[in-house]
């Protein structure tokens, strides 16, 4: 989650560094923006999905949990992600993957395309 007045790409870099020890100095490509409507106690929000490129073997080997926000991490196939994620989150993933293939940023409302 971004801090107050923190750009989304800076928040991504900070969160990856704080939570997994991953230091990114590469270009980030925006793949998807998803507007999430208010739900439960939460106000509306914007979810950004960036492509960080392919981490090197060395970067992957150095990943580690740095704080209590995460219990674990793993790399999974798209099919495995579909089994594990809520449908609206998986929809965001598929939109981001499509955006990477087509070079067109996806814009969603609650995980659904706006067209």
Image (spheres, rainbow, N blue to C red):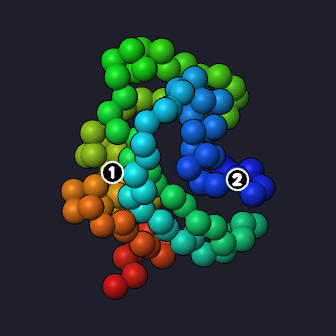
Q: Position of residue 69 (x, y in %)?
A: 67, 34
Q: Is residue 16 above or below residue 100?
A: above
The local secondary structure at tag 2 comes to: loop
Along the viewing direction, whichever of 49 and 80 lies nearer the viewer:
49
The residues tagged by marks 1 and 2 sit, at their Cα atoms, a distance apart of 30 Å
Tell me if mark 2 has few (under 14), some (14-19) or many (20+) residues whose alpha carbon lies within 10 angstroms of its own: few
Q: Which residue is under mark 1?
A: 82
Q: Secondary structure at mark 1?
A: helix
Q: Is residue 38 visible?
A: yes
Discs 1/2, front: 2
Q: Residue at x 34, y 85 (%)?
A: 115
Q: Measured from the top left, where is residue 40 in percent x and y?
A: 70, 69
Image check: 100 left or right of 34?
left
In the rendered image, is residue 85 in sight? Answer: no
Give the quarter of the image for residue 7. bottom right
79 with respect to 38 (left or right): left
Q: How many marks?
A: 2
Labels 1 and 2: the sequence-earlier one:
2
Q: Residue at x 69, y 26 (%)?
A: 67
Residue 16 lies in what quarter of the image?
A: top right
Q: What residue lies at 72% left-to-right and 71% top-to-bottom?
A: 43
x and y percentages locating residue 46 in the rendered image: 58, 66
Q: In percent of the image, x 30 and y 67: which residue is there? A: 104
Few, some or many residues within 10 Å of mark 1 (<14, 14–19, 20+): some
Looking at the picture, how far across and down is residue 21, in whole percent? 57, 23
Front-lying residue, 106 or 89: 106
Q: In the picture provided, is 46 more to the left or to the right than 68?
A: left
Q: Observer-nearest residue: 70 or 97?
A: 97
Which numbered dot is residue 110?
none
Task: Give above or below for 54 relative to 94.
Answer: above
Task: Reply above or below: 37 against 100.
Answer: below
Residue ID for mark 2:
6
């Amino acid at each position: 989650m971004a801090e107050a007045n923190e750009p989304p790409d800076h928040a991504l870099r900070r969160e990856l560094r704080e939570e997994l020890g991953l230091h990114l100095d590469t270009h980030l490509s925006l793949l998807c923006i998803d507007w999430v409507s208010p739900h439960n106690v939460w106000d509306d929000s914007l979810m950004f999905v960036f492509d960080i490129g392919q981490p090197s073997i060395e970067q992957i080997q150095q990943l580690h949990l740095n704080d209590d926000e995460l219990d674990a991490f793993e790399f999974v196939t798209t099919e495995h992600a579909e089994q594990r994620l809520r449908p609206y989150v998986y929809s965001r993933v598929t939109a981001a993957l499509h955006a990477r293939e087509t070079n067109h940023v996806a814009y969603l409302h609650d995980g659904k395309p706006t067209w």
